[in-house]
C-alpha cells in the first residue's frame, strides 16, 4: 500500500442522474428521483478513487462500511457533485467523509470505509 495521501485530501466525482439511478424495486418504480442505493454506490466510488492510487499491483480495496444521510432529492438529468475527504488513515484502512450536492444544495452526506488487502487474502476470505 502506497503512502501518498494524508487526512484532509479530497477526491471529486460527478454523476449525471440517469433513469437507471432512480428508485425502483421488484414491485416497480417508486419515484423518479436519485435512489439512496444509487447515491451510496456513487459515494463509495468517489472514495474508491483514493484506493485506485494507493493499492499496489497485488492489492485490492474492499468496502467495510457506508453510512448515508439522504437529505434532499436529485432528479433525472441533475448533475450531482460528490466530494470525498480522507478523515482517517489507520494501517490498511482508508475512511472518508463525503458530501453530494446539486449546485449549492446538499443532497447527502456520510462516511465510507475501505481496507486495502492483498488479492491473495481476499481470495481466501471469499473461499476461492
Image: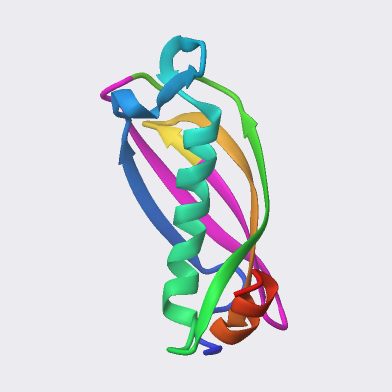
Within the image, what quadrant is residue 6 found in? bottom right
The residue that appears at 66% across and 79% down in the rendered structure is: 124
- Coloration of the structure image: rainbow
Image quarter of residue 70: top right
User: Going 45% across and 55% down the picture, which residue do you hit?
Assistant: 46
Q: Which residue lies at the image location 51% right of the left edge and 59% below the top edge?
A: 47
From the viewer's perspective, is 44 left or right of 53? right
Q: Is residue 15 left or right of residue 84?
A: left
Indicate yes or no whether the magenta region holds residue 79.
yes
Front-most of 91 and 117?
117
For residue 38, above or below residue 113 = above
- Vertical arrangement, residue 81 with respect to residue 74, above or below: below
Residue 125 at x, y percent in the picture: 69, 73
The residue depicted at 64 percent of the width and 69 percent of the height is 126
Query: Which quadrant, please, contains the N terminus?
Result: bottom right
| Residue extent of the magenta highlight | 76-99
* Main SS category, magenta section: strand
- Using the image, determine if residue 94 lies above or below residue 69: below
Residue 91 belongs to magenta span: yes
| Whole-percent x, y for residue 11 in the image | 43, 61
Q: Residue 97 location, x and y as percent?
A: 62, 53
Position of the C terminus, as image quadrant, is bottom right
Q: Position of residue 118 (x, y in %)?
A: 59, 85
| Residue 77 image-quadrant placement | top left
Q: In the depicted view, which residue is nearer to us: 118 or 81?
A: 118
Q: Number of numbered discs present?
A: 0
Amino acid at each position: 500500500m502506497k503512502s501518498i495521501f494524508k487526512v484532509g485530501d479530497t477526491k471529486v466525482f460527478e454523476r449525471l442522474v440517469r433513469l437507471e439511478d432512480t428508485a425502483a424495486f421488484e414491485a416497480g418504480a417508486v419515484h423518479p428521483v436519485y435512489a439512496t442505493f444509487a447515491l451510496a454506490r456513487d459515494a463509495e466510488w468517489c472514495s474508491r478513487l483514493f484506493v485506485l492510487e494507493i493499492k499496489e499491483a497485488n492489492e485490492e480495496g474492499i468496502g467495510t462500511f457506508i453510512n448515508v444521510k439522504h437529505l434532499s432529492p436529485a432528479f433525472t438529468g441533475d448533475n450531482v457533485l460528490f466530494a470525498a475527504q480522507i478523515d482517517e488513515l489507520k494501517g490498511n484502512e482508508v475512511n472518508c467523509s463525503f458530501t453530494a450536492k446539486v449546485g449549492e444544495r446538499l443532497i447527502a452526506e456520510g462516511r465510507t470505509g475501505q481496507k486495502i488487502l492483498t488479492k491473495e487474502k481476499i481470495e481466501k476470505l471469499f473461499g476461492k
